[in-house]
Image (spheres, rainbow, N blue to C red):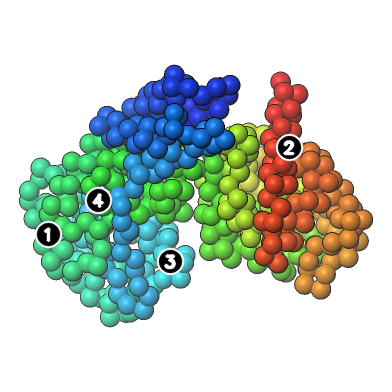
Amino acid sequence: MVLGDLGNQIASALSKINRESKIDDKAFTQLLNDITRALLAADVNMQLIQTLNANIKKSVSLQDLPSNFDIRRVIEKAVIEELTNLLDAGHHAKQPKRKKANIIMFVGLQGSGKTTTCTKLAYYYRTRGWKVGLVCADTFRAGAFDQLRQNATKAKIPYYGKRDESDPVVIAAEGVKVFKQKKFEIIIVDTSGRHKQEEALFEEMEAISNAVKPDETIFVLDSTIGQAAQAQAEAFKDRVDVGSVIVTKLDGHAKGGGALSAVAKTGAPITFIGVGEHMNELEKFNTRRFVQRILGRGDIESLVERVKEHKLDDQKELMKQIQKGKFNLAMMRDQFQNILKMGSFGQIMQMIPDSERQVQFGYDADQFQNILKMGSFGQIMQMIPGLNNMPKESEQASQKRLQSFLVLMDSMTEEELNNPDISFLETSRSRRERICKGSGVMPHYINELLAVYKPFAAAAGKMKKLPFGKNGELPKNPQQMGKLASMMPQSFLKQIGGQSGFMDLMGKLQGAEGGDAMKNMQNMQSMMKNMGSMQKLMRKRRR
């Protein structure tokens, strides 16, 4: 999880002050001390921390607050606001324009992950409909061209480079010219990694910049160097027009907070962050949303955007089949693939608000409105019975399990995938052995896959009896809604307050389509509190 330790420590400090019966100067000072320790552990500059604490004190004057004010809410708002300011550069980066050549030049330190990040950014734009090309102008590092070629081939992105040309300026100019002639919209130029003390490489960087005249120069920074990032970023800005920064390796290092805050103070906005090794693990950086995520408040806006980017909110064909009571392994495979398209489990989990913290500090009405806007995919995700059968385990293990299921299903025949009756898979030893050999997956995964499938199929069979609307709308009659509630997993029903909570939630989802979903927010907040209380009770029982 990105900056999980930092977020947990600050969230813990906020929870601690929330439990105080009376918030006085002593409790408030303790909160600031806890935040200071958390930021120091993340390698944030002490001067920046002192400024942050001074601004929080200025925003929260305990003596001047009226007695009817919610002090806890005021404190939390001030902390989030100042953490956001700490990471915010103050302005936005230039955005590429459609139907024209946008030249992006990458610069950065040696070993910062620059070449990999070039391909990740190219993949990001390609999956969003842009025509993207990569140019390898790194002639300094041995193997740089081979690395870019392999990455580009894997990501299905055209690339340009020359093994027999030693002048990076020539390669860059020729590559940009070739892609411009072919009407490419985004042309990414990868250059040699360099250090601020390496004057010759800096001169080479300036020469490439003058030759290709980039619309945007992106500085790639390794987060593991912490607050030392500021000096490096400023050195690059002094030589070329750095328009934005991508911070890499944020998925597993304690110094990430120091790097983010240090770069922000240079005035260069952070546009993306690297959160893993895979091609889709490059995330667009939004300061406020990022702070909310590391504090456990979630990022529903980004989750909704990701659903819409991958067109996962349009599941009309699936809903038609389910309404007819039809469901098979091929349909379940498609849904699993949709889940993985949205990113790793860790990324998705950080976007979902921590309900306990929402209960403590009050639920964000705007975020909940966005949940309601998610449409059919959001409803399906909350109600998929099979996912409740998945064993409780780590994010990585859950993702690996889901990928193993997909590999198994890829080894099945069309007949096996499209037949809703799975009894022949349960009884035929030869079929099971063939599937396992073809997929390289252990036999016990077949049993787990079928155990996950059965609740899907059972729920689809019951759906056939429900009177859906012409356009697939959920039933509104209380008796019919009660039938729908009875099909849901008991654990899900318990979390939302039983059948009455389910009917309330469905009413909100239907109301969202008419634009009046937020009229009854007090009832919804009450439901969220019940959800949090129920989760606490369930945890106690498990202990």
Of callouts 2 and 1, the N-terminal one: 1
Residue type at tag 2: Asn
Of callouts 4 and 2, the N-terminal one: 4
Mark 3 Cα shell of 10 Å, populated few (<14), some (14-19), many (≥20): some
Q: Nearer the viewer, residue 44 or 421?
A: 44
Numbered disc in front, either 3 or 4: 4
Residue type at tag 3: Arg
Q: Residue 540 sits in which quadrant?
A: top right
Report which residue position mark 4 lands on. 267
| Residue at 57% in and 53% down | 366
Do tag 1 and tag 4 residues touch (Cβ < 8 Å)?
no
Report which residue position mark 3 lands on. 126
| Residue at 79% in and 41% down | 497
Mark 4 element type = loop
Where is residue 282 drawn, in percent x and y? 42, 52
Q: Please say if 144 is above or below 22.
A: below
Of callouts 3 and 4, the N-terminal one: 3
Mark 2 Cα shell of 10 Å, populated few (<14), some (14-19), many (≥20): some
Q: Which mark is residue 206?
A: 1
Report which residue position mark 2 lands on. 530
Residue type at tag 4: Gly
The CA span between labels 3 and 2 is: 44 Å
The CA span between labels 2 and 1 is: 60 Å
Mark 4 Cα shell of 10 Å, populated few (<14), some (14-19), many (≥20): some
Q: Which mark is residue 454?
A: none
The CA span between labels 1 and 4 is: 21 Å
